[in-house]
Image (cartoon, grey):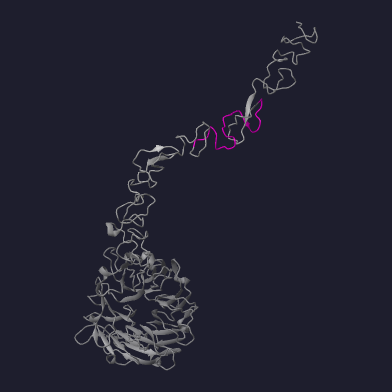
Amino acid sequence: MWGCDLLGEDAPDRDLDGYAADNDCDDDNPNIHPGAPELCDDVDQDCDGVTDDSDSVDAGVYHPDQDNDGRGNPEGGFRSCTQPEGYVIDNTDCDDTTPRISPDVAEVCDGEDNDCDDEIDEEDATNAPTWHPDRDGDGYGDPESPGVTDCKGPAGHADNGDDCDDDDPEISPAQTEIWYDAIDQDCDGLSDFDQDRDGHDDVNHSGTDCDDSDDSVHPGAEEICGDGLDNNCDGSTVGCGMHGEMDVSVARTRITGEESRDQIGQNIQPTSDINGDGLPELLVDAQYANHGGDNSGAVYLLHSPLPEGELGLEEAAAVLIGEEADSLLGGAIATVGDLNGDGANDLVVSALFATTDSETGGAAYVVLGPITDSLNMADADARIGGTSNGMHLGYAIASTDDQDGDDLPDLILTSPLHELAAGRVSIVAGSSSGSQTLEEAELQYMAGSATGDTLGAAVLHIDLNGDGVGEVLIGAPGRAPLGTSQTGAIYGTSLPLPSDPADSDWILSGLEDGDLLGATILSAGDVDGDGRPDLLISAEGSGEGAGAAYLFLTPPTEAEDASLADTTFMGATDSDALGAVMTVAGDLDGDGTIDLAMGAPAHTSDETLRSHAGRIYIFSSHLRGVVEAEADAEALIDGEATDDEAGTSITTLGDVNDDGNDDLLIGAPYHDTAGPNAGTVFLLTGGSI
């Protein structure tokens, strides 16, 4: 078909769109010709030589989006087939300078039309407060009155409902609480009788808080040792440390024997720096150890501080070794000061079954400090041997003032089984050297006056009257005045020693047959603060074997008996033998007073039924009158297992773990941690129990 052409009458029109080929830019598509509607499809429909121009019928109108919030400025839009960068189709943004304002933003109370609805701070603003009547004008509204939600509240209203009394301007959250008047001035809703806000009302206002000014003090609080406060309001400022019933399993450290049958812990002693490092050490016996032959015995030196956990004696810093089989080194151990004037502390240890001139009389060995290495007693600096069979030379050891004029301390050695157990107390030169018999070394002596007196079972050198000159106290637990049986006695004498005990300055006697007064004598320090030392004395046979211990605040000066004691500690059972083992244990519970520890190694606990497990009683030294062991002890510490005999020896090494409380060492020679009867020494820390 031929169509009409404005430029040529004979030009063809193949697509029959009314435009000849020479004027149609696409004569094969009837939708493309001059005057056709332009579309956004990259095709020049109207044959004007431009594709997708702004007059395309489907072109969008794009508006500036300066704040990039997806909403465009209604002003400044233009048509385009493609979206220019920074423009959007939407034109509903009423403020294109900030994204905080657009139809997509929630209205808030800020004086602006945030949601572009031509209203400002309307009542549906998300942060519009609820206004409550404020009748008392204190700025806090009544929560019980209906509120009005709006950005701007009505007159006489507050933007909160926090007033707990809207009729009293002196009551509101802005006020300071006045305690204990039953009025909640600050409207916090909490008790008016709990000033420290620890959840416990004051004890003076029907509550249980014994200190309502301190939130760390209230029922259920942890008791803090040594701070002088009753933290848990139980009526006591102690309550921590060694209190109540426990057993030695709570120990911080266990010191164990090397081998079965060593039986360590029959005699444990602290020392005042025997190796020169400025710290105290611990000496532990093992009288049946075999280093120098079967049952030769040994004494182990351990440095402080002692580590936590188990400590085997094979880790000891040094070992003193018995020189012969069956001598049982370690029967007594004493730090005796500086015997040779070199500035170091020295040590004396005994072996009660050592032989001298074929007699098993025992021996005392002098070991001069500092002690840094192991030593066989055959190489000791001095050896003093007993020449009477079974006399037990060295059963008790002490140092004394100079008696031989060399300005050095001398030694007291006792032999309670000498001459059919009459006993003997000897003073020998501290400067002794080499090997001597007792007869060769003896400077002075006192001999028991009767068979069985056991003079020398205990000895103490002490300045009782503060004159700077020491006296000697000597125990004779077997002494039996006419018509009695083993009441026991303690002789107090100045030096030089009288040979006859009857010539002593004073004698303290037991009360009943079998009391055995004088088996143990200790200085208790100055318990009553009068500037003079006090005495702690045992009567382990008292009460048919229950035992007793006596605290004297005023030492005897003439013939007296134990009834004059300021405190009498009574054993609990006929197996206790209370007083046989004692120590002044320092302050175990942080209450500022000295505690006394007393062992009962044969005790059988009614609760555990462990026969001969042993028990240790802890007493305050401030107790007076008659003190019953189980009823009045601050702590009862039982042995861990049957036949352990915990409490055979007891001592303290001070505050091992630096918690402000002294700590306790307890010997249990038949405990089986390292093997049958290897023995264990338990360290219990005062403040952590």
- Relative depth, front residue between 510 and 639: 510
Q: Between residues 361 and 303, which one lies in front from this camera angle?
A: 303
Q: Quick check: is 94 in the magenta stretch?
A: yes
Question: In what quadrant of the picture does the C terminus appear?
Answer: bottom left
Identify the residue at the far left of this view: 483
Residue 4 vertical position relative to residue 507 in the rendered view, above or below: above
Q: Is residue 517 above or below residue 182?
A: below
Residue at the (30%, 62%) spot, across then down: 234
Q: Is residue 415 magenta?
A: no
- Horizontal and vertical percent position of residue 446: 32, 90
Q: Main secondary structure of the magenta part?
A: loop
7 lies left or right of 181: right
| x and y percentages locating residue 465 in the rendered image | 33, 86
* Residue 118 in view (yes/no): yes
- State which quadrant residue 388 falls in: bottom left
- Kindly tell me whether residue 672 is visible in this rendering: no
Residue 682: image location, x then y, percent: 39, 69
Residue extent of the magenta highlight: 79-107
399 vs 428, nearest the viewer: 399
